[in-house]
Amino acid sequence: MLLGLLLLLSAHAAPLSMLVETHPTTAVGACATASHRAELPIRLDEDALVYVEVAEWDAPVVAGLAEGSSVCHGAFSPPPPRTLAARAPRAMVRWLPAGQHQLTLDSTTPASAVVSVSIVSPRVLVESGVHPVLARSALLAADHAWTDGHANRTTLAVADFSLPSTTERLWLLDLADGTVHLHAFLSHGKGSGHPTDAARAVRFSNRPHSNQTSLGLFRASETYTGDHGRSMRLDGLEPGVNDLARDRAIVVHGAEYARVDHIAEWGYLGRSHGCPALDDRLVQGLIDALHDGGLLYAWGGPRSGDCCTLRAGTEPSPDAPYLPDPLGLVSIY
């Protein structure tokens, strides 16, 4: 049992990856009870999103994130070893408050696994130029997406449409290593534009044919080749806010009008029919990072309100009784 090993993790903590072995125990845990366990105490110095990945397990295990002895923030069971499904690592993402927690690995027999942990606090995004309210809301949105089984990639794109299009207002964050990999310009829909300032977006909608940008949390879905070349469909995850994105053909695509030299010539980026459009020379990197399970969180500024973030902008996802998730990615207790 890994007793006495204490990690003080913050926004600047390097991702941890280590081989963990279970040992006989009689302890009763918040997330699971088994005859063999490994424990990794973690102390967070600020509220943060915790990413846990388990790989190369050699026996059935249950990995959990617990606060004290009674609160289990989340747990998941990788599939049995020596199966096709077991070849891919399994991951869990959970928003945890500052304080003492522990990562547990439980099994009914001696077991081992390679466990990776990454800590991402809002400060990581804030230091890259993201508004503090947006930084927290985006990470809480990721918590909900993972908890509800909508996400299966570690990438999170954050878009701040309260900024003018003359400012780089898109960030790409990888939860697995806690680093920002992209900071880029982003176009908004022509229907969202300010009456006298073409660089600003002030109106947002889920309405078909509005040519307006939608806010909230999206799942990045499949790619396809269309008028703008290789593009990526988006599924809005918030009813009444962005859930018509697929019907509206709101997609991530590249465009020449989203290049920075368009700003030099016109004083603003060109505008789309509601799609988040990037420089056509850069967009493929973003699509590669997000498609089929990454997340996009779009924000319109403090005045757009938390109504446009479903639960995600207001509080962490609940620690409810067991709820199976639709994609079979994580079981929450």
Image (tube, grey):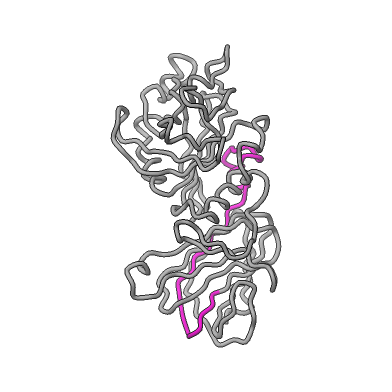
- The quadrant holding residue 195 is top right
Instruction: Decide whether residue 262 is among the magenta residues.
Output: no
Q: Going by the image, does 78 lie left or right of 138?
A: left
Q: Quadrant of the N terminus?
A: bottom right
Q: Position of residue 138 (x, y in %)?
A: 58, 44
Instruction: Decide whether residue 107 is among the magenta residues.
Output: yes
Q: Name the one closer to the observer, 3 or 68.
A: 68
Which residue appears at 40% of the width and 40% of the height?
A: 286
Q: Position of residue 125 (x, y in %)?
A: 58, 44
Q: Name the one closer to the observer, 283 or 151.
A: 151
Q: Position of residue 274 (x, y in %)?
A: 46, 26
Q: Going by the image, does 166 lie left or right of 316?
A: left
Residue 121 lies, with reference to residue 157, above or below; the image says: below
Which residue appears at 60% of the width and 72% of the height?
A: 31
Q: How many discs mark residues in the rendered view?
A: 0
Q: Position of residue 144 (x, y in %)?
A: 57, 51
Q: Going by the image, does 78 lie left or right of 307?
A: left
Which residue appears at 47% of the width and 52% of the height?
A: 151
- The quadrant holding residue 323 is bottom right
Residue 130 lies, with reference to residue 16, above or below; the image says: above
Q: Quadrant of the C terminus?
A: bottom right
Looking at the rendering, the stretch of residues picked out in magenta corresponds to 105-134
Q: Name the one closer to the observer, 180 or 258.
A: 258
Residue 70 lies, with reference to residue 217, above or below; the image says: below
